[in-house]
Image (spheres, rainbow, N blue to C red):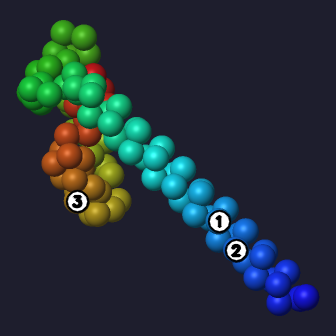
Amino acid sequence: MRSRTRSHQGETRATTMGSLSMKCLLFTSAVAVVLALFPVAAVGAGLKVGFYSKSCPSAENLVQQAVAAAFKNNTGVAAGLIRLHFHDCFVKVCS
């Protein structure tokens, strides 16, 4: 009797895990499809010097000072910033 109960519980647990995995897969697929249907507004938008010259004239200077200070404390910051530029996160987040 015990072996049947254990087997039944194991099958139930496996079925639950299987259905959970299927739900996660379907959800992820649905999100991917929705994201693929909406074009990113920043496609073609490039970074340029002086972009904030009218709205915030000191922005570039402030960013330069902040990056220099962060780099002085931790040289690994440079690699992270290069990664951000490579993946174009600044444009996507700010637009």
Q: Where is residue 32 in the image (x, y as percent from the top left)?
A: 34, 41
For label 3, the residue is 79
Q: Which dot marks residue 15?
A: 1
**Residue at 41% in and 39% down:** 30
In three-dimensional space, the C-alpha distance between marks 3 and 2, rounded to whole angstroms, equals 48 Å
Q: Quadrant of residue 17?
A: bottom right
| SS assignment at label 3 | helix
Q: Count of labels shown?
A: 3
Disc nearest the viewer among 3 and 1: 1
For label 2, the residue is 11
Label 3: few (<14), some (14–19) or many (≥20) C-alpha neighbours in 10 Å: few
Between 51 and 43, the one lying in front of the other is 43
Mark 3 vs 2, N-terminal side: 2
Q: Where is residue 24 in the image (x, y as percent from the top left)?
A: 51, 52
The vertical placement of 20 against 64, above or below, is below
| SS assignment at label 2 | helix
Disc nearest the viewer among 3 and 2: 2
Between 3 and 30, the one lying in front of the other is 3
Residue type of the residue flagged with mark 3: Ala
| SS assignment at label 1 | helix
Query: Circles 1 and 2: CB distance less than 8 Å?
Result: yes
Residue type of the residue flagged with mark 2: Glu
> If the image is split into quadrants, where does the C terminus sit?
top left
Q: Position of residue 34 (x, y in %)?
A: 35, 31
